[in-house]
């Protein structure tokens, strides 16, 4: 072990020379830095998560709270989450676009400039939060001047990907990907102005938050998952593409009207209760289609999966999506239930399971496909990666369930019995200790898989 660590230290986490059989286009290499930075930010995000759980689980001396208040650390936790996932998606796009379009990225230089811009905004924003430089709206805290840098970065990215696609071969995967990315960038703009009427402000806040995770990101996910499945199963791309269209159409149909599940209690018209209830409940359908699609693709391959670890993460994404977004989302989406559970730890539980199951695992599936190749490795022993996978999935499930119990207690004590906030908190503390316990193992699991990814050596095929 010690020698391995030293060898990794000497080699560094760099890529090494390109193997043209594994990475056919030189410009794909830019993805590596997006991935490595995303992984690092993910780790930081989780450590801050531990602090959040500690803040709930124990009574912390005021002196420490003044330095690391919950509002500040929560903003860091969620903004890091969004930042690393966006970097992961962009890296994924830069990796797959050349292979699909059969040509190099339009401008590698722009891709690096854009990476630097995003990381600079991220660091500035996090430091700024500590000095109270924030818009105050959850998840979209970053101040307006920085928003403009984000928009500029997003435009550079779209231009770069768009030019590559226009000049290259066009495929369904690329269509879905670019569609999702344009939609993603456009939505961000709606969250930029501050509307004086709070109802209207929240109305558009949800355009970013809901339409991202239940619309644009789903399209990007469908495209990346399709790419990965085509590559590792060797199945004819027609088989995968057929489902891609169905899924995308269903996601758009249910996800767009499904936004109504956030308009129940913000002062929007009453008809949203109906629209939100019915359409958001139907959002489970495209997710089920995605699970079926993944497993059918695997069957079409005749079991000849060339890359077992990538398949584990890809299948994990499909199942995790179903559990976190599908089941835990469905559980509180009807207005009759949401009336009681709104904004409680039940919401937090769903938020964790959905983000992790759908998008953390998806990102990691892509990392697992691309990173070993970029490091010049065609085959490796993935034992640590697999252990990491199971440790992280069970830990996240444990965390999600503990948060759910805390949420049920909170809902019952505060809203059914009408008792005070602190009465409920006192009962919930134990469950945050459990959350903390699983949180530590989550970090261990993710750490194991990243370590394996960045240090694995070539093994006999
Ligand atoms: C070390 C593990 C982690 C712990 C202990 C942890 C803990 C927490 C806590 C205590 C909160 C605040 C909830 C509140 O405001 O009441 C939070 C918020 C959040 N965390 Fe984590 N977290 C961890 C990892 C993650 C990961 C891996 C993800 C995503 C993949 C994630 C996504 C979120 C999201 C989306 C929120 C905001 C939830 C909402 O607004 O309802 N966290 N986290
Ligand atoms: C991968 C997709 C999804 C992700 C990442 C996700 C994530 C989240 C997050 C982080 C929140 C908390 C927002 C906040 O209040 O700050 C939330 C709220 C909510 N989600 Fe999802 N979600 C997804 C899909 C779904 C689906 C498919 C459904 C319904 C079937 C659903 C139902 C809800 C509902 C009803 C709320 C509002 C809870 C409340 O009133 O407090 N979500 N989601
Ligand atoms: Fe939603």
Image: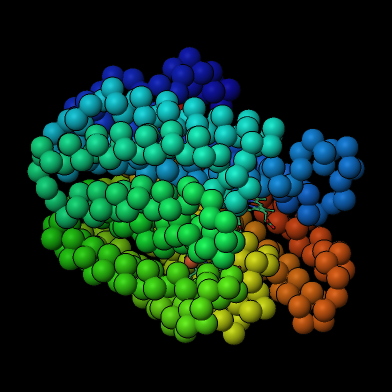
Q: Is residue 288 in sight in this rendering?
A: no
Residue positioned most to the front = 196
Q: Nearer the viewer, residue 69 or 9?
A: 69
Is residue 7 shown above or below 375? above
The quarter of the picture where the N terminus appears is: top right
- Total residue callouts: 0
The quarter of the picture where the C terminus appears is: top left
In the rendered view, does 243 fall on the left or right side of 141? left
Seen at 45% across and 69% down, the residue is 259
Q: How far from the left and from the top, in percent, is residue 334?
A: 53, 81
In the rendered view, does 270 fall on the left or right side of 456? right
Is residue 237 shown above or below 271? above
Q: How far from the left and from the top, in percent, is residue 98?
A: 19, 37
Q: How far from the left and from the top, in percent, is residue 144?
A: 52, 39
Q: How far from the left and from the top, in percent, is residue 58?
A: 84, 51
Q: Is residue 195 in sight in this rendering?
A: yes
Q: Nearer the viewer, residue 194 or 415?
A: 194
Residue 421 picture quarter: bottom right
Residue 142 picture quarter: top right
In the rendered view, does 372 fall on the left or right side of 53? left
Seen at 86% across and 70% down, the residue is 420
Colour approach in the figure: rainbow
């Amino acid at each position: 072990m010690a020698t391995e660590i030293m060898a990794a230290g000497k080699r560094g986490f760099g890529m090494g020379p390109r193997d043209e059989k594994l990475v056919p286009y030189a410009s794909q290499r830019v993805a590596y830095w997006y991935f490595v930075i995303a992984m690092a930010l993910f780790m930081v995000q989780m450590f801050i998560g531990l602090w959040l759980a500690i803040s709930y689980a124990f009574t912390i001396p005021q002196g420490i709270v003044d330095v690391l208040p919950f509002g500040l650390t929560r903003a860091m936790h969620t903004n890091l989450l969004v930042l690393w996932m966006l970097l992961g998606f962009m890296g994924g796009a830069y990796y797959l676009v050349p292979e699909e379009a059969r040509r190099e990225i339009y401008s590698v230089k722009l891709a690096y400039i854009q990476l630097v811009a995003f990381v600079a905004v991220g660091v500035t924003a996090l430091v700024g939060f500590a000095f109270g430089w924030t818009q105050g709206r959850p998840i979209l805290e970053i101040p307006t001047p920085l928003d403009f840098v984000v928009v500029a970065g997003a435009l550079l990215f779209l231009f770069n990907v768009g030019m590559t696609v226009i000049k290259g071969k066009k495929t369904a995967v690329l269509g879905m990907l670019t569609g999702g990315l344009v939609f993603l960038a456009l939505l961000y703009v709606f969250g930029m102005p501050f509307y004086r009427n709070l109802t209207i402000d929240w109305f558009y806040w949800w355009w970013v938050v809901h339409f991202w995770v239940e619309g644009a990101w789903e399209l990007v996910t469908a495209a990346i998952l399709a790419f990965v499945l085509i590559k590792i199963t060797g199945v004819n791309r027609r088989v995968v593409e057929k489902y891609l269209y169905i899924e995308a159409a269903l996601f758009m149909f249910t996800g767009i009207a499904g936004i109504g599940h956030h308009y129940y209690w913000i002062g929007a018209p009453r008809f949203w209760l109906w629209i939100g209830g019915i359409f958001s409940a139907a959002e489970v359908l495209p997710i089920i289609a995605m699970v079926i699609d993944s497993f059918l693709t695997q069957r079409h391959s005749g079991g000849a999966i060339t890359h077992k670890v990538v398949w584990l993460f890809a299948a994990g994404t499909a199942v995790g999506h179903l559990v976190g977004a599908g089941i835990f989302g469905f559980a509180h989406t009807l207005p009759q239930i949401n009336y009681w559970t709104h904004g409680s730890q039940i919401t937090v539980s769903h938020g964790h399971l959905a983000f992790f199951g759908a998008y953390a695992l998806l990102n990691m599936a892509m990392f697992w496909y691309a990173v070993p190749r970029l490091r010049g490795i065609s085959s490796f022993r993935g034992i640590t990666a697999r252990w990491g996978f199971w440790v992280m999935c069970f830990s996240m499930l444990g965390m999600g369930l503990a948060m759910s119990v805390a949420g049920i207690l909170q809902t019952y004590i505060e809203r059914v019995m009408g008792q005070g906030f602190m009465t409920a908190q006192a009962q919930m503390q134990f469950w945050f200790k459990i959350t903390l316990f699983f949180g530590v193992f989550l970090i261990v699991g993710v750490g194991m898989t990243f370590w394996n990814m960045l240090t694995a050596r070539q093994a006999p095929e």
